[in-house]
Image: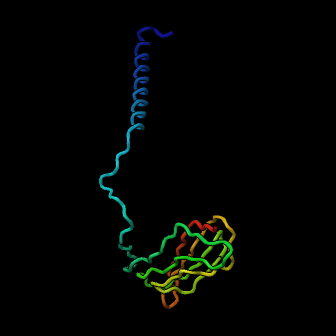
Amino acid sequence: MLSNKKSIPIIITLLIICLVLILCLFVKCEQSQTNLTPDDSAVHWDGEQELSRPIVNDKPAIAIPGIKEIVFSTGTKTQQVNFYNPEENDCYFKMGLYADDELLWESGNVAPGDGYYTIELNKSLPAGERVGLLHIRCFKQDGTELNSAQVKFNLIVQ
């Protein structure tokens, strides 16, 4: 057994370690119970604002429309959409619509500012939710392919 003189520093060290651990736990609990405060620099959001596009090789980048969700009607090949090539682009789009990796529709060459409100699918779809994908290929007017984009979205058929 240790002598009394040697055990006193060990006991004091253990007590200090215990106090530090208890203090750390108390501070952590206090921090988790504080209320969040909003960022004062944030403003009320009232819709998207017009932003400049990135510049690539001294030209504005190609604008690609985003899609979060599309709802189709079951039992018909004719569907309503909002597929378009933004007016500010200087390239043609060729679009392919896929559901669960199966091609359902393909566009012709879509000039800037043009698009589709109604499309005819290769087949009608049964009701349900699936992963939709709009594959957009971009071309110069001379037919040179530039780049492509894939826009994933939730496709609901009801």
Residue 125 spot, x, y in % from top left: 68, 72
Question: Where 77 falls versus 144 (above or below)?
Answer: above
Location of residue 30 by image quarter: top left
User: Is residue 149 or residue 125 the one in the foreground?
Assistant: 125
Q: Residue furthest bottom?
A: 142
Residue 122 spot, x, y in % from top left: 67, 80
Residue 10 spot, x, y in % from top left: 43, 17
Residue drawn 65% across the image and 76% down it: 103
Residue drawn 44% across the image and 20% down it: 14
Residue drawn 36% across the image and 61% down it: 45
Location of residue 130 by image quarter: bottom right
Q: Quadrant of the C terminus?
A: bottom right
Question: Where 127 falls versus 21 (above or below)?
Answer: below
Q: Is residue 122 left or right of residue 68?
A: right
User: Is residue 63 or residue 2 the one in the foreground?
Assistant: 63
Residue 57 spot, x, y in % from top left: 39, 79
